Image (spheres, rainbow, N blue to C red):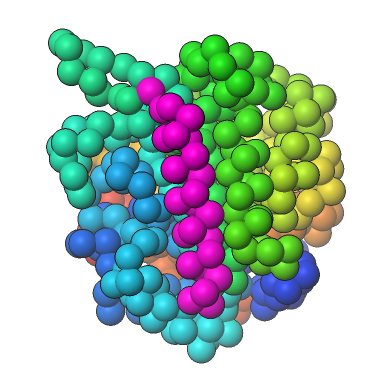
Amino acid sequence: MTVQALFEPFRLGNLELPTRVVMAPMTRNLTPGGIPHAQVVEYYRRRAAAGVGLIVTEGTTVGHQAANGYPHVPRFYGEDALAGWKQVVDAVHAEGGKIVPQLWHVGAVRRLGVEPDASVPGYGPSGKSKDGVEIVHEMTQQDIDEVIAAFAQAAKDAQAIGMDGVEIHGAHGYLIDQFFWDGSNKRTDQYGGSLANRSRFAIELIQAVRAAVGPDFTIIFRFSQWKQQDYSARLVQTAAELEAFLKPLSEAGVDIFHCSNRRFWEPEFEGSDLNLAGWTRKLTGKPTITVGSVGLSGSEFVQFFTNTEEVAQPAGIEALLERLNKQEFDLVAVGRALLVDPDWALKVREGRQQDILPFSRAALASLV
């Protein structure tokens, strides 16, 4: 099967991509001080030069005191960090690629002792204490308003430095997803209870971002059924429930949905082969990005966070191409395969699959 479908241009409003290949956001913990440095610039530039149409950066924290949960992750606030990101933008654009930052708040995942202020606990929809110490601060209305304002400001800053849009991280058990999920949202006010109420925070946040950047700046929203805390978790059980969940987000201002699966080939609901991106496109009419073990076989990603000799070998993408040709989804995000091999897209395009590098834990240690 021809790989040409992956290398067709894509256009949505002002966003014009040279290919359908997207670099998935992947936290690297290799940006001390949160300021993108020369290696970060080169890391993203190389992917654009090799044919990645859209780069979604690793998660970048918004300007809120509890946004960060990990050491050495980049931030998207402050003149120094934004100047660093401007260098990344210019390098990617010089290679003909497009780039958006993933805007991130980890919420209740944060623990005391984490940078930049070790005394700040996690913030979440519901609070948690242990031995009389507040581990997670239950967000007040003022807290909610401040976080929403931080996302809006980050989006405005992204637009100002020439980014091609933004991705809002609403997946994987981080703050926005914590509001969605009844396992972490026990509120009894307008932000808790029904899924419609639990979606209110995300809707208000998307609306604020849209107001900050205007009608023509691309907003991508990433969501997932699974959570870091529970891989079997599901926000919705049926296509009808998924439609009810997605429609308000779409109307709030989302242009593209980034639908996070652990394996792109798995059907979302019984009775249909459509994956989460396929169903989302069908139900909303909006373009979607599929993701999940593209180009790799075997080993789960989580295995590589422990000492392991496991290796994920390159795998064929025939099933992916078949779905893309059927227009089940519009764009394809590649994670680990691109992390280890910056020339993955070029090798696929040139039929040099035998030259694609396997993925192992060693790939996580440096920016290649």
In this view of the protein, which residue sits in the foreground, 69 or 187?
A: 187
Relative horizontal placement of residue 130, taking residue 293 as reference (left or right): left
Q: Which residues are magenta?
A: 138-162
Q: Please provide percent x and percent y for residue 304.
A: 31, 43
Q: Please provide percent x and percent y for residue 146.
A: 44, 43
Q: Please tell me whether residue 142 belongs to the stretch shown in magenta.
A: yes
Task: Residue at 76%, 67% (x, y): give it.
Answer: 12
Q: Residue 248's image quarter?
A: top right
**Magenta span main SS:** helix
| Residue 56, above or below 122 | below
Q: Residue 87's image quarter?
A: bottom left
Q: Please provide percent x and percent y for residue 230.
A: 45, 23
| Residue 134, above or below 30 | above
Task: Residue at 54%, 50% (x, y): give it.
Answer: 168
In this view of the protein, which residue sits in the foreground, 120 or 60?
A: 120
Query: Would residue 199 be visible to someone looking at this image?
Result: yes
Q: Residue 310's image quarter?
A: top left
Image quadrant for the N terminus?
bottom right
| Residue 199, above or below 53 | above
Query: Would residue 52 be visible to someone looking at this image?
Result: no
| Residue 305, above or below 352 | above
In this view of the protein, which residue sits in the foreground, 323 or 17?
A: 17
Task: Name the residue furthest bottom.
Answer: 94
Image quadrant for the C terminus?
bottom left
Task: Residue at 28%, 51% (x, y): give it.
Answer: 361
Task: Name the residue furthest front.
Answer: 142
Q: Please tell me whether residue 183 belongs to the stretch shown in magenta.
A: no
Q: Please provide percent x and percent y for residue 125.
A: 45, 25
Task: Residue at 81%, 43% (x, y): give it.
Answer: 284
Relative horizontal placement of residue 147, taking residue 331 as reference (left or right): left
